Image (cartoon, rainbow, N blue to C red):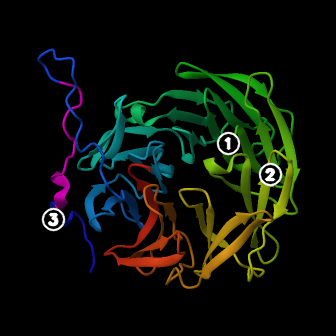
Amino acid sequence: MKHSSLQGGLALSLVLALAACGGGSGGSSSEAPHDNTRIDTAGRLAMAEDAATALRIYDLDSSAVVANFPLDNPPSAVYASPGRRYALAFQRTQDTVQIADAGLWQEDHGDHLHDYQAAPKLLSFRINGPQPTHYDDRAGQASIFMDGRAPSAVASASVFKDADLGAGRVGANINFAQPMHGFAEPNGSFLIATYRAPEATGPTQAEIYSRQGTQYTLVRRLDAQCPGMHGSFTSGGTTVSGCSDGVLAVSPQAAGAAAATKITTPTGVGTIAGHPQLGARFIGIGNAGTPSTTRFYDIDAAAGKATPISIPGWADGRLRRAHGFDRAGRTFFVLDNTGTLHALERGASGWAVKKSIAGAIAAMPTAAPFPAFAANEARDEVYLSDPGARQLVAINNTTLDVARRVALDFRPTYLAWLGIAR
């Protein structure tokens, strides 16, 4: 059965903005019991449509599209906010990010956690800046890096939490000296960002900034060089960035004590994958060779070493099309250009393939946008969009089997899971 927009209002009127928490009004010292404070939900997916100015909110409990928001432009990417309540629809070339409330969230009421569910809505608040590109979501806060636009629009970054978005603001801003294709990784009250020298074509060093209120102040520029600097991830107190000759690990992020360690790899790294449960262990990803082939490296930042990851059958010319971890960080998924999904698990000897699912994607596109990956943080499932077959593919991360294929009446591209993490 195909699922089109706004399927019959869904029992969405379930605005389980449940009973107000807080005790009676008669001055009694006893507090009323809190019933129905937990919602058993698999969450929702924000889904973009190929070349369309639309953002759909797909409810995983009812298997239906429950909202279809018109955007100003086709999104260049879709991400989840750090608290997983909001969808961020990037429109890079139009210099804006539109924001949708998916309608699932949790509040800490002191003596209990209280779940809420409401109808999705598109916010009037948006984040503007020249070419919003990189998105870094770390430990409850996130940053959007704006590349800027030569010659006069410099790069910048906006840092925020879910509470900021709900209040129609960002938490802090920073402007850099040059336009550049870079990143800004939040880590507590610090920010690890790229530095581009005036004579360079791109960033080659890292800088550490400290936050004061809504602004950042430079603490230190690290001397270590990282040519072709691109891609980043922060975990276990360490920020790792890709370089054309390996990776750069910056740790610890403390004023005056930060150090940078260069870890070399046989080929360059342009993407860093990580998960909070892995600490200072990362996966470096990069394309190299003729024909261009994707290579993977197990990065141990604490030990300062990188080990190649082998995927059986990964021949020359094989390329990564999507990747990501399950919610626990136990399984790393890689989708290749033939439509095969590889599930890797890490043991004593490193990452190894546990299972490969041939034909996970029924119709692999020959050009972007390619399938996107999203992990459910409330259930043991991960998802792939399959634009060529106009379907959503759900994978059970315990059995590593295709759980279901959901037919859609549009070509889904970018995905983001939204909901209450368990």
Q: Residue furthest front?
A: 30
In the image, residue 17 lies in the stretch drawn in magenta: yes
- Residue 300 disc label: 2
Q: Residues within 10 Å of mark 2 (few under 14, many from 20)?
A: some
For label 3, the SS is: helix
For label 2, the SS is: strand
Magenta residues span 10-23
- Residue 8 disc label: 3
Closer mark to the observer between disc 2 and disc 1: 2
Q: Main secondary structure of the magenta part?
A: loop
Disc tally is: 3
Point 56% across, 39% down: residue: 139
- Left or right position of 186 against 48: right
Please state which amino acid type lies under the numbered disc 1: Met
- Left or right position of 95 against 268: left
Closer mark to the observer between disc 3 and disc 1: 3
Above or below, 256 relative to 347: above
Please state which amino acid type lies under the numbered disc 3: Gly
Above or below, 353 relative to 147: below
Give the CA separation, mark 3 to mark 1: 46 Å
Give the mark nearest the N terminus, 3 or 2. Answer: 3
* Spot occupied by residue 264 in the image (x, y as percentages of width and height): 88, 54
Q: Quadrant of residue 123?
A: top left
Give the CA separation, mark 3 to mark 2: 50 Å
- Residue 412 disc label: none
Please state which amino acid type lies under the numbered disc 2: Asp
* Spot occupied by residue 101 in the image (x, y as percentages of width and height): 33, 46
* Spot occupied by residue 384 in the image (x, y as percentages of width and height): 49, 70
In the image, residue 349 lies in the stretch drawn in magenta: no
- Residue 180 disc label: 1
